Image: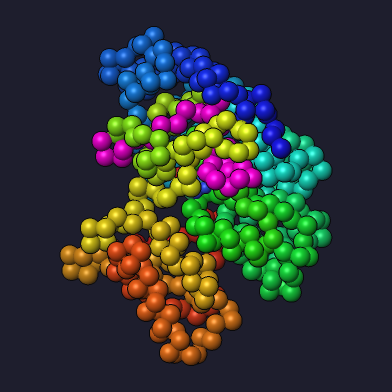
Amino acid sequence: MIFQPEFETLPPEELRSLQTERLKKLVHYVYERVPFYRESFDAAGVKPDDIQTIEDLQKLPFTTKQDMRDAYPFKMFAVPMEDVRRIHCSSGTTGTATVVGYTERDLQVWGECFGRFITSADCGKGSIVQVAYGYGLFTGGLGAHAGAEAVGAICLPMSSGNTKRQVQLMHDFGTDVLACTPSYALLIADTAIEMGYNPAKDFKIKAGILGAEPCSEGMRRDIERKLGIQVHDIYGLSEIMGPGVACECECQNGLHVCEDHFIMEIVNPETFEPVPDGEWGELVITTLSKECSPLVRYRTRDITRIIPGECKCGRTFRRIDRIAGRTDDMMILRGVNVFPSQIEEVMMSFPEIAAQYQLILTRRGPLDHVELQVEPVPDFPFDEIRRLEQLKRDLGAALKSNLQIKVDVKIVEPKTIARSEGKAKRIIDLR
Ligand code: DLL
């Protein structure tokens, strides 16, 4: 099912011309209203009228997270405060928070974007959407909530936490779709099983709209099997719109970007030159319809690629691949670049290993040292030392042959790695 076919299935040339018109308006809009953009365009020697095509976008400088921090709190707002209806901001754990404002229209567009994703999970009026993303300054909860309302579904605003209650209501109310992080979905599934349920059989639930953190194919299949659902990977970031930027359709073959509202570019993260479709690089996003906090060429630091070709579902919005990781999370182990998600993928090919892990980074002399802590699945005989040692050796060997990295594997007792109700903390950096 498609929520807004008039946009989602626009022929590619019409979509490009819609983007071009919106882009031309946007550059005037930000130049006139946001001093940061006036200064950065002037410094680059570009006037709004120089932007006539999508390719002209490359004449403009990038916007970075630091630029947003420098504008703290409201200097990037393009509307007067009386037109702002909501403010969200990042947690600010790694520096000054980035602040994003929403007008009434921004909130409406956000709901419509998320509504498209609920519809692609074959839910709508009458469906129960259990929102187990955190509510608050984090965009997950309220973004999913707005999506449920936009399609006329029944919203169950659980927020994160209270896991047994999540399970109970999911069962008793007959939830159709769960919206939360993949690691929390797994915790909900495991908790349901511990409570004596077989959610795949006993529960009505059929879909999960899971995102905000990387999730390997192996972990996705684990969640799908345990809950008996189809998982749709959803991507977004608070600087742009929270969860409303891109989502997988029923084909599960890449995430359709809401291209009527965003222009995406993929650039080489070192040279910042555009890369051809199909090649991996950093995702850069320009917002086309945001009124309060528009952004031009925002460097997301997320690594993905454009998947060439059409999707069978009929949507014409182009797709990005599942996010491999953030440039900030990339580890360089003896010269080999690796993302935690790649380690997860290898790990998840072992049925004896549970989908919970942590990477502990330390320094040994001049070299980085990585310890991968994993848990066996609950029915693994943890006291059989020889089987445990064998599993450890096999996983170490698989990581070496697949990723060319040497990682110290430590198998810890089941249920000792901290579970997450929001985004899982995979890396503990003690360097
Ligand atoms: O995580 C917004 C969101 C909420 C997205 C709910 C999806 C669902 P931030 O907290 O600002 O916003 O974190 C954004 O999380 O730059 C990525 O690095 C990462 N991320 C988000 N979605 C995915 C995903 C929300 N599907 C940062 N796969 C982004 C991998 C993701 N990483």
Query: Can residue 430 be seen by looking at this rendering?
Result: no
Residue 425: x, y in percent? 46, 60
Q: Residue at x 68, y 74 (%)?
A: 194
Q: Residue 203 lies in magenta, yes or no?
A: no
Q: Residue 259 lies in magenta, yes or no?
A: yes
Which quadrant of the figure has residue 300?
top left
In the displayed structure, 352 sits above or below 332; it is below
Give the number of callouts. Answer: 0
In the displayed structure, 105 sits above or below 142; it is above
Q: Nearer the viewer, residue 35 or 420?
A: 420
Q: Nearer the viewer, residue 405 or 89?
A: 405
Q: Residue at x 71, y 37 (%)?
A: 1
Left or right: 182 as drawn, with respect to 146: left
Left or right: 218 as drawn, with respect to 403: right
Residue 286: x, y in percent? 45, 28
Query: Can residue 119 be seen by looking at this rendering?
Result: yes
Segment tinted magenta in the rendering = 243-271
* Color encoding of the figure: rainbow
Q: Residue at x 39, y 48 (%)?
A: 326
Which quadrant of the figure has residue 395?
bottom left
Q: Nearer the viewer, residue 185 or 4?
A: 4
Residue 280: x, y in percent? 37, 43
Which quadrant of the figure has residue 335?
bottom left
Identify the image quadrant of the C terminus.
bottom left
Left or right: 133 as drawn, with respect to 149: left
Q: Residue at x 25, y 36 (%)?
A: 271
